[in-house]
Amino acid sequence: QVQLVESGGGLVQPGGSLRLSCAASGTVNSAISMGWYRQAPGKERELVAIININNSTNYADSVKGRFSISRGNAKNSMHLQMNGLKPEDTAVYYCNAHFIRPYWGQGTQVTVSS
């Protein structure tokens, strides 16, 4: 059974930085893609960034130039470096990994507030 473990959320002031990490366990296969989604109160879950098995990446327009997704050293791990955080980035961030089917992490809270 694939499990995703997230870390790195927290409270940060506007303009600050956070780094989220996610690692998948329970499989020897490589994820087709791994990504981060977020959901703010009263809003739908939305894609933030994704990295594919060929290392191509895609970002939501709202985070381009501020966020960077990268692979970790361990297989099926990744990081999301978030710089220039804004209050509108406040949300629960979910790690997603797509193997035969998609799997989700439990979510980590990111709060941007002064």
Image: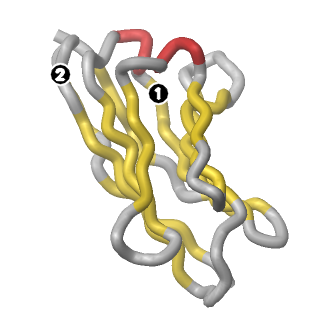
Q: Nearer the viewer, residue 27 or 55?
A: 55
Quadrant (top left/top right/bottom left/bottom right) for the N terminus? bottom right
Residue 92 placement (x, y as % from top left): 48, 35
- Look at 64% across and 17% down and name the residue there: 42
Q: Nearer the viewer, residue 18 or 42?
A: 18
Q: Amino acid at mark 2?
A: Gly
Q: Nearer the viewer, residue 111 or 53?
A: 53
- Look at 42% across and 50% down and name the residue there: 70
Residue 69 placement (x, y as % from top left): 44, 43
Q: Amino acid at mark 1?
A: Ala
Sequence-wise, the earlier of marks 2 and 1 is: 2
- For residue 45, what is the image quadrant? top right
Of helix, strand and loop, which one carries label 1? strand
- Disc 2: which residue: 16
- Disc 1: which residue: 91
- Look at 34% across and 47% down and name the residue there: 20
Viewed as shown, does residue 1 lie left or right of 89?
right
- Tell me, yes or no, whether the two marked residues, 2 and 1, touch with CB atoms within 8 Å: no
